[in-house]
Amino acid sequence: MILIRILGGWLIGAILLIGCTSEDEQEISGDNLVRFNSQLVNISSVSRSSDVSGPTVLTKENWMLGDAIGIYMKYNDSKPFSKENIIVNNYRYLSTKDKVSTSIFVPATEEDKIYYPNLGSDFISYYPYESTIGKECLYPIDVSQQSDPSKIDLLYATSNAGSSEKGDVSLSFKHQLSKLVLNLKPDLAIPELSDAWATLVVMASGFYTKANFSLIDKVISDRSEIRDVSIAKTPDGMRVEMILIPQTVERNMCLKFGLSGNKNELRWNIPEGKVFEAGKQYEYTVSVKMTWIEVFEGEILPWGGGSKFDDIVWGKSSDTQYGLTKITGGDYYIGSPEGVGEENEYPRHKVAVGGGWISSYEITNKQYVEFLNKVRGVSFNGIKDGLLLMDVKDDAMKIEYIFDNDTWKVVDPSWDNYPVVNVTWYGARMFAQWLGGDLPTEAEWETACRAGNDGLFSFENSNEEINYNDFVNCEQTSAAINGVSGGIVPVNYLRPNASNLYNMHGNVYEWCLDIVRRSAMGSPAPYDYRPTVSDEKYRSIRGGSWKTDLNKCRSAVRISYLPDHTADDIGFRVVFPISNVANLNFGELEEFLKVSPLP
């Protein structure tokens, strides 16, 4: 669930003493001292730590003794606030109470005293105080240091009550930045994760850390300084909070989760184009394993509403537990124009693709073990009904048979969410059909891979420089896990394409349904060739792998093998066409969703 909160009604009071500029001829009463009664209401931005000492406050929820606010004043007239009509400029006031939601603020010095003018006044106030604000009234935002988020939680309030008498001025303060909250759900049954959890470090990468906030019209401008920022966490490490400058997510923005000093161990790539708005709190629940994280969506609510982070709605996951992405039916182009790519990618042509869903990730070891134990009848050497499903003898196979109880298991839980490999076309299709789905056709696979992009890769953008390491695990890029590169990576480790599909380029090849003719060069024949009865029944694989060069990972590349072929860089994913709905095994599918790919 995404939970986003806007602060509703924070009332703040303080004592303000005013003077006027020499340019103004209105009289100011000498004894009508301004008072501000500062009250914070709708306190909710509290980290729910499991620590017995109670909740841990990270952002600004209470006034502390000595907290300083800045005050601006103009006369109460028809003119809006502007730098030309301000008569009190950035006077400083301090809280007189500690750890309370209501406090009286008094002038920091004699020079900071403010008195009511005879004709009334309007006020602007902000927190935390900054002495360097100039005549342009631009507050310098800097969120690069987040060890104490309450020190950078920009609050703002105005009052146009027009008072010119003794008494208190009420100011309702609201958050002007954005807040990101992650409620972490680690699988502490994994010994390595439990032992290292205390060393957790969460870094935000690619975000703007500096900007200017106009105290006149609340406009944020001049965003700058993109850098990695360490995010504050609760003592038990189960919740982290970050203050963000309101901004739109760009391609390289992500959160990195590090254990035992490895800050790049896991990564959440925040969807490009997402907008973090001012005054809102974005709250997510994150499932954490040693080599896997999954982020669940929630609701966008005002910063200051009640927290709902424990009410996980699995059906609202970004894809569902299993990870399904919708394919919209229609006519799409696949293949490459002549002169681009390999001959077997010609001709580029239009295909009709029916609607349905495709698995967002390559099928994992954990998922495949669930299948093996449910269907039964798979021999210890990976054969069922006379068909070879997998090569269990290969060292790269992370699934093993347990003779004592006639079951299958992943050799080590750390391999749960890596793609299953050494599976034949028969083994891949039997899995898909068990759930009521099938292997994708080449047309379905390439349509899903391209995600509307006609370039060589689904992530190409002519306006930006491409960082292939973000999207492709291949021979040249070699994504690293725990500092070791040159192998397969977890199925959601790299950035997804525009349709939220992971590892469509590289990591492991993926079996497709189609029968193809294999040319003398060992690749499928061009698209305009139609297989005959006498042809051997080769099947296509798509996407490239960690062992191939980058060129083999293009959207249009086609390779083929006999259906009983296995390799340590061939896996698969599943498609569920709308036309197959009648065949869906809802009972097994529902059970299956509970174990994959999440804990």
Image: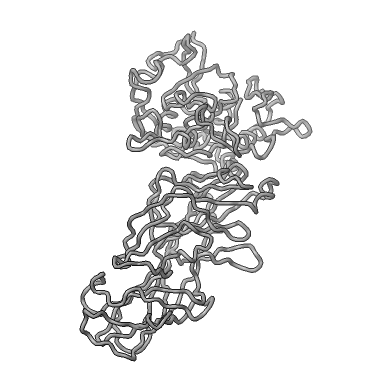
- Foreground pick, 25 / 564: 25
Q: Position of residue 387 (x, y in %)?
A: 63, 20
Look at 58% across and 43% down and name the residue there. 265
Location of residue 450 (image quadrant): top left
Q: Position of residue 288 (x, y in %)?
A: 59, 48
Query: Do we see residue 3 in this rendering?
Result: no
Q: Position of residue 486 (x, y in %)?
A: 57, 30
Query: Do we see residue 85 in this rendering?
Result: yes
| Left or right: 255 as drawn, with respect to 378 | left
The number of callouts visible is 0
- Foreground pick, 535 / 212: 212
| Left or right: 587 as drawn, with respect to 224 | right
Look at 40% across and 72% down and name the residue there. 173
Look at 35% across and 60% down and name the residue there. 212
- Foreground pick, 260 / 351: 260
| Left or right: 549 as drawn, with respect to 49 | left
Q: Position of residue 498 (x, y in %)?
A: 41, 39
Look at 40% across and 18% down and name the residue there. 342
Q: Would you place residue 174 above or below residue 169 in this image?
A: above
| Left or right: 537 as drawn, with respect to 272 | right
Location of residue 278 (image quadrant): bottom left
